[in-house]
Image (tube, rainbow, N blue to C red):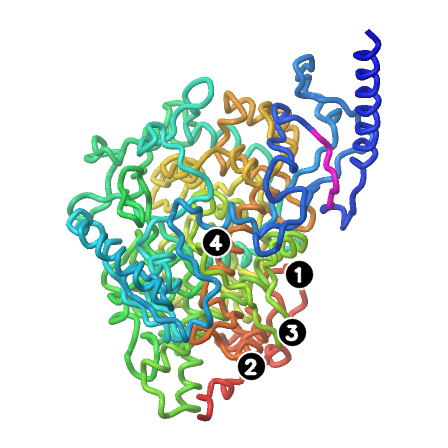
Amino acid sequence: MYQPRGLGGMTWLLFLLVASYAYANSNIKVVLNSNIELSLNPEGISQKQGYGPQPSERQGYGQRSPRKQGYGPVVEFNPRRYNETTTRRNPYSADTEDTGNYNSHIRRRSRLPDPNQEMLLKIPATSNCRCYNDDPVQGRIRYKTHLGWLQNSRRRRRGAEEEEEEEDEDDDDDEDCDFAKRLTCDYTSKFRTIDGSCNNLAHPYWGMAETPLIRFLCSVYEDGMSAPRSRGKFGPLPEPREIRLKVHDRSRPRHELKKFTHYLMFFGQMLSHDLQENVKSETPDGEDLDCCGIHRSDLNCIMRLRIRGDDPFYGPFGVRCLNFARSEASPDLNCNSKVRQTITEYTMYIDGSSFYGSNEEDYPDLRTFTGGLLTTQDHPHGEGELMPPTDEPEDGCRETTFKCFHSGDGRVNQQAPLIAQHTLWLREHNRLARKLAELYPGWDDERLFQEARKIVGAMFQHITYTEYLPLILGDDIMDLFQLRPLPKGSFFEGYDACVHPGIRQGFFVAAFRFGHSMINDFVGFQPASGDYRRDRLRDIFNIPDHLYQREGIEQTIRGLYLERSQSVDRLKSVEVLNHLFEIGPGTGSDLISININRGRDHAIPPYMSYRKMCNLYTTNKFSGLVDHTQDVRELLAETYDHVNDIDLFTGAVSETPLDGALVGPTLACIIGLQFKALKVGDRFYYENNEPFAGFRLSQIDQIKKTTLAQVICRNMNIGKIQKNVFIHGLPEVDCADIQDDIDLTHWADPTP
């Protein structure tokens, strides 16, 4: 009798000691600032309460693993300071009523993942990642062209040859698959290929134009293969238009961002176009599908947007359907077509492909093949170069008085600010090509073109990582994901051939569409002397005429930094809610319904799945949406049957922004991870210390002198400008005071 009691007493005493120690240590943390904490022993909350696996249960969390494994210390992320004095109770336990008293909830800390985690950026072993990080510099590697396998030893060469023989036996099975084609890569080339191939020498298809997008999370097709997600936890999902009307309405005034300009939003659009272009299904003749008309029975039209008769906008016009064709289906890179994949038309790198095109077929119309120059036309008022005209307008461009413009991206004519930005970078390319031709008369057209193209792409990358992303993500996220370019005099040594730089589906169809929240109803135009003018966005869709007018380009650029952006939230501009690409009353589309529908078309998991991926707080109740305000929680509860049904776009853009950022924690995580991959997985990233592909250090330092304001001053007759065109209200300065052009003498060929 006594022995069991004694044993039980000792066990109980030991338990009390351990529990006391654990409780004492649960409060140990290092506070970096109001947003970030490094926790040594996070509070233990069970998985059923919505927090997911605890750090001690997940590899890479709660411990310092060797850096070579890609893991670091736990980074606790506190996106908002909740009231420390609130009642510390569990609002999700069985005996807790959902009273709507959200202020009584425990203060919760949301965690963002270590941005180096292999599980989020590296390709899983099941994808047959061939990565040889132990190789010497790539200039010494013997490169076998079949499927891009690297080899510098007899063992690798034998393995590759045996693998090639086995694959040759299956060539007949893959003859209809574009990705079965063997690519030949020149590892000594210092320039990107036009289609993005051969960036990764071991995986030449990675990031290439017209290849499948990749995923953070597995697809959630309803049948596991192709059928779009249409059902939630308890029944059918709400229609996209219904979600738009309930959550993304205009029931209250929108919030202008007092600090940021409209240029910030439009630069984001330009960047998005450089990274991705969805390929929609077409008829066998290559025509667009009319899913509300003659093609409504086509299988790729099953997701057309249904409009109710009592729709507050479309109802009076008798509109019962908005056109929506599914994205074109594709096999994966292994030529497996069992599960539907989707492709992007352009390269998946920050490389200027929207100016230069993404295939050789674009070159005859875009290049002069003389002096490295891009094709132009003269401005009718003698105000510099314009993009060439086209006789085959794309993407709905409407010719009235003047012809539509032609560029590497068919969407170039969508509105005046986009045309102005394309024109800016065309002029910068030609300016560089002419200066290089003066300095190096022995260079031929191809050398001049490629050198200027490489510099422009590097400038575009530099502006993205130094001027654009810090305003979107904030300083803390930029540091957390190590996205900042290095100081002058330093190479970036972080290129990783096993990181796929490709665009992830969650980023493509949801996260990077956050900019749609920032659209202002009006676009401003400011002449050098005269009154400021504002046009409704719907009135300038797909009409290029303004850029042909006197001071057309300069008026547009000035208007971009004089007009403000809207905040990132659930509310959107009416110009894109009902009037997208409108050509007459009731003919416009609904951009937000399209975003939600496209996410389901591409089978991305719902919002809460990405919260879990990012190691943020998850819940099974609407009251547990800790990164939303009470009014948004109530709207989501009225719209969806269950919190796990919430679409990623709707859930993420309606989060309260992080301190110092424009986006909430879920968007910050997805965008941060994507731009991390675009940096470390791009062999041609401008800071890389890569043989052949990289710049010399002196050249990198010259590129780092560049700002967007300088590029504008060099190529526009603008006189005065803000030093940072993304921040509203800064004083204008003379262009001459900020000019610090890059010194192209650093591009001279090294002396043997």
Mark 2 burial class by Cα count in 10 Å: few <14, some 14-19, many 20+? some
- Which secondary structure lies at badge 4? strand
Mark 3 burial class by Cα count in 10 Å: few <14, some 14-19, many 20+? few
Q: Is residue 271 above or below residue 434?
A: above
Give how far across and how far down residue 265 sits, in percent.
53, 54
Along the polypeptide, which appears first: circle 2 or circle 3?
Answer: 2
Along the polypeptide, which appears first: circle 3 or circle 4?
Answer: 4
Disc 1 to disc 4, C-alpha distance: 21 Å
Give the foreground label among 2 and 3. 2
Nearer-the-camera pick, 615 or 477: 615
Nearer-the-camera pick, 127 or 91: 127
Q: Residue at x 46, y 71 (%)?
A: 136
Amino acid type, residue under disc 4 in the picture: Asp
Q: Which residues are magenta?
A: 37-44
Location of mark 4 (residue): 535
Disc 3 to disc 4, C-alpha distance: 27 Å
Give how far across and how far down residue 165 sits, in percent.
21, 56
Q: Is residue 69 above or below residue 602?
A: below
> Which quadrant is home to the N terminus?
top right
Amino acid type, residue under disc 3 in the picture: Val
Mark 4 burial class by Cα count in 10 Å: few <14, some 14-19, many 20+? few
Q: Residue at x 42, y 31 (%)?
A: 240
Give how far across and how far down residue 180 sits, in percent.
24, 54
Q: Is residue 588 above or below residue 480?
A: above
Whether the magenta-drawn stretch holds residue 39 is answered as yes
